[in-house]
Image (cartoon, rainbow, N blue to C red):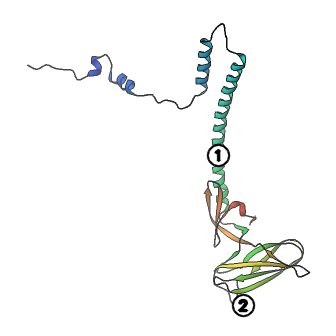
Amino acid sequence: MSTSVSSDLYSSIGLDAATAAAAGKTKKKKDTLDQADFLKLMTTQLQHQDPLKPMDNNQMVAQMAQLSTVQGINDLNGTVKGLQTSMSSDKILRGAAMVGRDVLVPSGKFTLETAGAAEGSVVAPSAGQVTVDITDATGVKIKQVTVPATAAGEVAFQWDGTGPDGKRMPPGSYTITANHADSAGKQTKLRTYTQASVDSVTVGSDGLYLNLKGLGTVPLDFVLRVS
């Protein structure tokens, strides 16, 4: 003779399976206090205060101020997160608008294409003459471009891509250096700025970076002019 034993242990103690499953779940503890927790603590403190020694008004005001500060910080955090998301989207849109455009950036190199001229500029300290020396990858000077500076300010220069024999040089990267000579013959070395095309844009955690054809990557802040 066999005895049947019920395998439904939950039913034997008056619980159904759903109730047991819910009871078995552990509620996740909160790591921080929110506004409701502050109010509950304050209410409990008022209920258990000594009638002969009620809570000091200054303490009450201080606690209310702390509650307002915590709530304000939480609201501010939400606003900042929304602003960060909006700024990230704006960076992407700004970057997409730069692709395919020509930009003027600080650089000591020219990028010569298979056709067309290479362009750049300097800032002359005064009227005089600007000379730009162009050298190849081996360090050999292949051309010198001379441009008059009528006054202090930006002076544009251009290289047609030809070498000393008048033939066009192969496409690639060329080094440039610029000097200024005033009416008294004083020489001043100048910083050069060259024009390059934007191939693509990288969105970094600290801003936009432009990937320029032949020049590499530069921050957006380096751009002086877009054309």
* SS type, badge 1: helix
* SS type, badge 2: loop
- Tell me the quadrant of the picture where the C terminus can be found: bottom right
Read off the residue under disc 2: 164
Question: Residue 138: x percent and y percent?
Answer: 64, 84
Q: Nearer the viewer, residue 49 or 168?
A: 49
Read off the residue under disc 1: 84
- For residue 200, what is the image quadrant? bottom right
Q: Nearer the viewer, residue 97 or 85?
A: 85
Q: Tags 1 and 2 in contact by the CB under 8 Å rule?
A: no
Is 184 left or right of 105, judged from the image as shown? right
Residue 160 visible from this viewpoint: no
Which is more N-terminal, label 2 or label 1? 1
Residue sitting at x 62%, y 12%:
49
Question: Residue 106: x percent and y percent?
Answer: 73, 69
Question: Residue 65: x percent and y percent?
Answer: 70, 25
Residue sitting at x 69%, y 20%:
59
Whether 144 is drawn above or below 9: the answer is below
Whether 13 is drawn above or below 201: the answer is above
- Tell me the quadrant of the picture where the N terminus can be found: top left
Question: Residue 111: x percent and y percent?
Answer: 67, 76
Q: Residue furthest left?
A: 1
- For residue 174, what is the image quadrant? bottom right
Q: Nearer the viewer, residue 179 or 103?
A: 179
Please give the label number shown on residue 184. Answer: none
Q: Residues within 10 Å of mark 2 (few under 14, many from 20)?
A: few
Q: Nearer the viewer, residue 45 or 212?
A: 45
